[in-house]
Image (tube, helix red, strand yellow):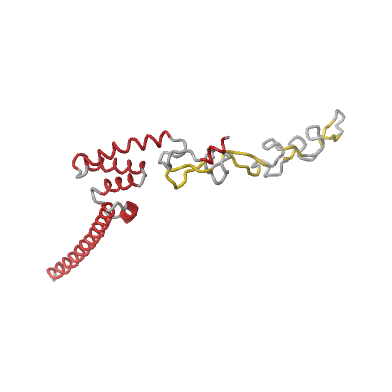
Amino acid sequence: MKTFASFIFLLFALQGFLGIAASAQVNLGQTDRWMKGALAAMERSDYQTANSIFRSLIDSGLPLPEEMPYYFSETLFQLGQYDNSQNFVNKYLELTGFTGQNYEAARRLKEKLKAPLAQILACEQCDRRGYRYENCSTCQGKKQTEQSCSYCKGKGVVGCSRCGASGMVKKVNVFNIVDFFECERCAGKGRLACPNCSGTGKEVSACKSCEGSGKTASTALCTHEVHAHSEAGKK
């Protein structure tokens, strides 16, 4: 009876192992198809398609082929995404060292990246990734935003602390007689102009969207040339 139970247990364990193996085989097959499709797209200089396939492979969560980071970095270079290209070629060299099939090609790619990356660093029209700046949509390039004063809640006035916002000050003379006088601080109004916004009800602060720079990166790669309208705006 024990022998039969052991046999049943081994049978189920074998079925589970075969199921896992089959699943792994399917996953490897999908990875292989994606890689072949991406490489074929690269051969016909269709780098947009290659880029899309590589990103699908990354998003899939499947194990990545060892040479994939190099091919992706080459694709990104051809698309002008130099900063991202550098990230992937560095990762490829870090993972494969001298043993990678594309080691020499990767070293050449790093050399090719030096010039465009230097252009990006020297350009004032784009961020460090090479994407062109545009006016911040929140502050319209003004670097600051205006909002209701947080101290007076936009009212522009606050209660006088000396008279408790009553406008009158109580004084007791030597005969213990209570007299009331108009508060000198607020001139009997019981309120004062807000010290934070000077009575405007508004306060100005650095724009949080662009961190006070007046610009944010767009989705367009920079040509490192000043736009005509930008020059006109400076005159």
Number of dots carrying numbers: 0
In this rendering, position of residue 90 left or right of residue 142? left
Looking at the picture, how far across and down is residue 27, in whole percent?
25, 59
Of residues 62 and 132, the one nearer the viewer is 132
- Horizontally, residue 88 falls left or right of residue 2, namely right
* Vertical arrangement, residue 53 with respect to residue 133, above or below: below
Q: Is residue 9 above or below residue 119?
A: below
Please name the residue shown 20% across and 43% down the image: 100
Residue found at the far left of this picture: 3
The front one of 43 and 131 is 43
Choose top left, top right, bottom left or bottom right for residue 144: top right
The residue positioned 70% from the left and 36% from the top of the image is 198
What x and y, as percent, mark residue 109? 28, 40
Q: Is residue 103 above or below residue 171?
A: below
Question: Image quadrant for the C terminus?
Answer: top right
Q: Position of residue 103 (x, y in %)?
A: 21, 41
The quadrant of the image that shows the N terminus is bottom left
> Residue 187, how many percent across, how many down?
81, 35
Residue at 44% of width from left, 35% of height from top? 123
Q: Nearer the viewer, residue 11 or 37?
A: 37
